[in-house]
Image (cartoon, helix red, strand yellow):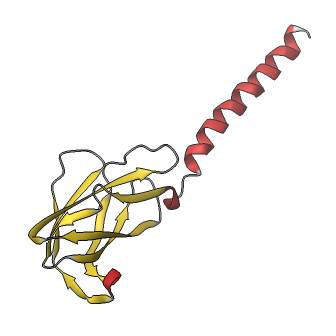
């Protein structure tokens, strides 16, 4: 190869590698993220604390700065979906960990439903997580 044919080939390879790296990030979708319970058992009571982590399933890394716009806790796993209780977001001290205070008046199966916007994604993330309340 001469010097003149080597330069275009090297430039084309460099451009290809650059665009490959850029498009892998652009192909992220809201399905690549999920909420996970920090604990599957929560102590029941008027000040029960529920913590979840938001995870990028592709890398396993925690995702900070999501905007939680919907939250609900109810007893759907025990067939009592209409038994919903108040829930409020708490400040978090760890990036990617989201905490909530809820009234969990009785032991049993509970479901936490969350709706969130992940930074850089156009769609909204929705997850339903089941946990057990213990006395």
* Extreme residue toward the front, this view: 135
Work out whether residue 78 or residue 70 is closer to the camera in this orientation and state it. 78
* Extreme residue toward the right, this view: 1
Question: Would residue 27 appear left or right of 111 to someone viewing this image?
Answer: right
Query: So how many labels did they put on this image?
Result: 0
Q: Using the image, determine if residue 78 lies above or below residue 96.
A: below
Residue 83's x, y, as percent?
A: 23, 88
Residue 48's x, y, as percent?
A: 13, 66
Q: Using the image, determine if residue 5 lies above or below residue 99.
A: above
Residue 106's x, y, as percent?
A: 15, 79
Residue drawn 61% across the image and 36% down it: 21
Q: Using the image, determine if residue 132 lies above or below residue 57.
A: below
Work out whether residue 70 or residue 108 is closer to the camera in this orientation and state it. 108
Instruction: Give the quadrant of residue 98.
Output: bottom left
Question: Would residue 82 appear left or right of 124 to someone viewing this image?
Answer: left
Work out whether residue 19 or residue 117 is closer to the camera in this orientation and state it. 117
Tell me the quarter of the image containing the C terminus.
Answer: bottom left
Instruction: Give the quadrant of residue 81.
Output: bottom left
Residue drawn 30% across the image and 62% down it: 40
Question: Would residue 37 appear left or right of 88 to someone viewing this image?
Answer: right
* Extreme residue toward the top, this view: 3
Q: Using the image, determine if residue 51 lies above or below residue 20.
A: below
Tell me the quarter of the image containing the N terminus.
Answer: top right
Residue 111's x, y, as percent?
A: 31, 75
């Amino acid at each position: 190869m001469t010097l003149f044919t080597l330069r275009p080939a090297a430039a084309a390879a460099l451009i290809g590698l650059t665009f490959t790296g850029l498009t892998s990030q652009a192909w992220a979708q809201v399905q690549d993220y999920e909420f996970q319970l920090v604990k599957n058992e929560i102590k029941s009571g008027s000040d029960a604390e529920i913590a979840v982590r938001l995870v990028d399933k592709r890398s396993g890394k925690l995702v900070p700065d999501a905007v939680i716009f919907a939250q609900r806790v109810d007893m759907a796993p025990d067939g009592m979906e209409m038994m919903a209780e108040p829930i409020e977001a708490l400040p978090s001290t760890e990036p990617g960990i989201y905490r909530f205070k809820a009234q969990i008046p009785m032991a049993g199966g509970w479901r936490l439903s969350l709706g969130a916007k992940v930074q850089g994604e156009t769609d909204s993330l929705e997850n339903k997580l089941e946990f057990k309340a213990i006395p």
